[in-house]
Amino acid sequence: MRIGCVGVHVLDHLVIGIESIPEHGGGQLVETIRLSAAGTAGGTALVAARLGADVRSIGAIGADALGDTLVALLSREGIDTGGLVRTDGHQTSASVLPIRPDGARPAWHCIGANGAFTVDDVSDQQLDGLTHLHLGGPEFLGGDAAARLLRRAHERGATTSVDVLAPGEPWLLEWIAAALPYTDYLLPSDEQVRGFTGASDPADGARALVELGAACVAVTRGARGASVVTDDGVLDVPAYATRVVDTSGCGDAFSAGFLRGRSIGHPRASAELGCATAAQVAGGLGTDAGSYTLDDVVAFAATADRLPVR
């Protein structure tokens, strides 16, 4: 699998051991502060590389130390970073994530160079040789531009996937709708599906997204696992039990696992691999937590307990 991960690349600053935000000029000792490559393109690229895919990152970063660090973290995973263009006047996108004891994480985020990225930054050379193109954050391009990019990938024989970064809103669906007919796999959360469609049942909402053109909608549902919806029906897959440290990057991990699974297996295997990969990431700090391979995640999926579907 040779995958191009296009769009949102972020440098996450993760802090674990947060009890409260100090008042005024106060301070507080924490357990850990670390950096991780992240984003709906960058995080997916990182995890896909861990799972054995040949990965190319394509996006925009700043001409700054944050960008240097992000490139170094991705390159360390064996990712081709030649598609990351440097932009003057925009810093590299970054987030600060104070991790709560239950793994939840509020965030401070700077959009930075991701807001300056356009389809003109994606050369034909960057698309050549890809078997799959994953677009993270189509809302930054707009539906028409995203559709052109996905169509270019299809014309070169690649399959495509889309993961929206922003919370689900009806206006946002309208903004990116033109891209759906060129999307083989749409990878939203259940909250995004509800927001996009107004459906109370994510499966019903996913069916509406299929009717709008997406060939397959794989919905992440947190502790409830995932639902894969196509014209053929709905496939529900439960989540895996794990000790949650940090939930940041779990959606990107599911995307990488699901897409890697599609390249080597069938729908249930793909969804199960996505859920198992998300559990792997949730058990550590940051998208790049720990050290694992495709074989490790497959072995985990074969032995770990499954959470009950509620």
Image (cartoon, rainbow, N blue to C red):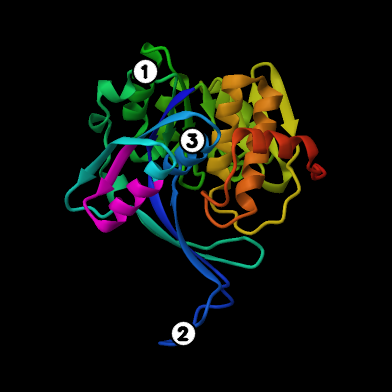
Rendering coords of residue 13 (x, y %): 44, 61
Rendering coords of residue 43 (x, y %): 47, 44
Task: Give the left or right position of residue 110, taking residue 291 as reference.
Answer: left
Q: Residue at 61% of width from left, 33% of height from top? A: 294
Tell me: residue 167, above or below residue 100.
above
Front position among marks 3 and 2: 3
Q: In the rendered structure, which disc, 2 or 1, sits on the residue that comes first in sequence?
A: 2
Q: In the rendered structure, which disc, 3 or 2, sits on the residue that comes first in sequence?
A: 2
Look at mark 3 in the image and give the residue it sits on.
Answer: 49
Q: Amino acid at mark 3?
A: Ala
Q: Residue at 80% of width from left, 42% of height from top? A: 306
Residue 27 image label: 2
Task: Give the left or right position of residue 234, taking residue 177 as reference.
Answer: right
What's drawn in magenta, residue-wise? Answer: 58-73
Rendering coords of residue 22 (x, y %): 49, 83
Q: Amino acid at mark 2?
A: Gly
Q: Residue at 37% of width from left, 56% of height from top? A: 94
Q: Toward the viewer: 250 or 54?
A: 54
Front position among marks 2 and 1: 1
Q: Is residue 275 visible?
A: no
Q: Quadrant of residue 189?
A: top right
Q: In the rendered structure, which disc, 1 or 3, sits on the residue that comes first in sequence?
A: 3
Look at mark 1 in the image and give the residue it sits on.
Answer: 129
Label 1, label 3: how many angstroms apart (C-alpha)?
A: 16 Å
Q: Circle 2 — which element?
A: loop
Determine crowd level at label 2: few under 14, some 14-19, many 20+ residues with C-alpha closer than 10 A: few
